[in-house]
Image: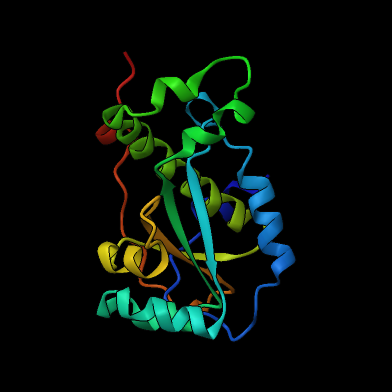
Amino acid sequence: MDLAALFSSARTFNAYEDCPVPEALLRQLYDQLKWGPTAANSCPARFVFVTSAQAKARLLPCVNSGNIAKVNSAPVTVIIAADTRFFDQMPALFPSRDFKTLFEGNDAVIADLLSRNVPLQGAYMIIAARALGLDCGPMSGFDAAALNAEFFPHGQWQADFICTLGYGRKDSVHPRNPRLSFDEACRIV
């Protein structure tokens, strides 16, 4: 396992080569990220792979101006969304316990689970994408209300963040910013 490719050498890309990402690779990506653990095996994230020119044209007006060029150059932008009715799948995902009844109608418990597990699954996606040779550009710079209205008008899915995927142009990365040291960020108790 090449940890450097996943973390220390990996970068956030701001522009991409004009090279499509095959659908088979996107399917392989999901087939790997889905195995990452979530609370009660809830798997609440949903992934919308924006690849067509028509879908990109719908997405671009929802993206903050500083991210338009990044999204425009990427062959794929993934909308990582929360399924507010993830618990409908719980009988299949965790058949030995009645989690559907625990969540249904309990908005605070639903929101709590979504706030932790959807970004977690998005992080699994980034790591899996890097492991499969793709470069990433995760971002929160978009108008969530506009994006939800455009892509999820039914309201069941709600955008959490977006992430560009493709083969990054090395000249598009910014200088590496520092990170906190172990002693600044960690405690062993």
Q: As drawn, is 101 to the left or to the right of 21?
A: left
User: Quick check: 92 above or below 29?
Assistant: above
| Count of numbered labels shown in the rendering | 0
User: Quick check: 146 above or below 46?
Assistant: below
* Residue sitting nearer the eye, 14 or 153: 153
x, y (%) of residue 109?
Answer: 32, 27
View extreme (right): residue: 24
Coloring scheme used: rainbow
**Who's the residue at 34% across and 18% down the image?**
188
Residue 113, located in which quarter of the rendered image?
A: top left
**Who's the residue at 51% across and 77% down the image?**
170
x, y (%) of residue 79?
Answer: 45, 61
**Who's the residue at 51% across and 24% down the image?**
40
* Residue sitting nearer the eye, 161 or 159: 159
x, y (%) of residue 16?
Answer: 52, 80
Q: As drawn, is 166 to the left or to the right of 103?
A: right
Residue 5, located in which quarter of the rendered image?
A: bottom right
x, y (%) of residue 141?
Answer: 28, 66
Picture quarter with the N terminus: top right
Residue 140 visible from this viewpoint: yes
Q: As drawn, is 49 to the left or to the right of 118?
A: right
**Who's the residue at 44% across and 40% down the image?**
85
Q: As drawn, is 29 to the left or to the right of 178?
A: right
Residue 171 visible from this viewpoint: no
Picture quarter with the C terminus: top left
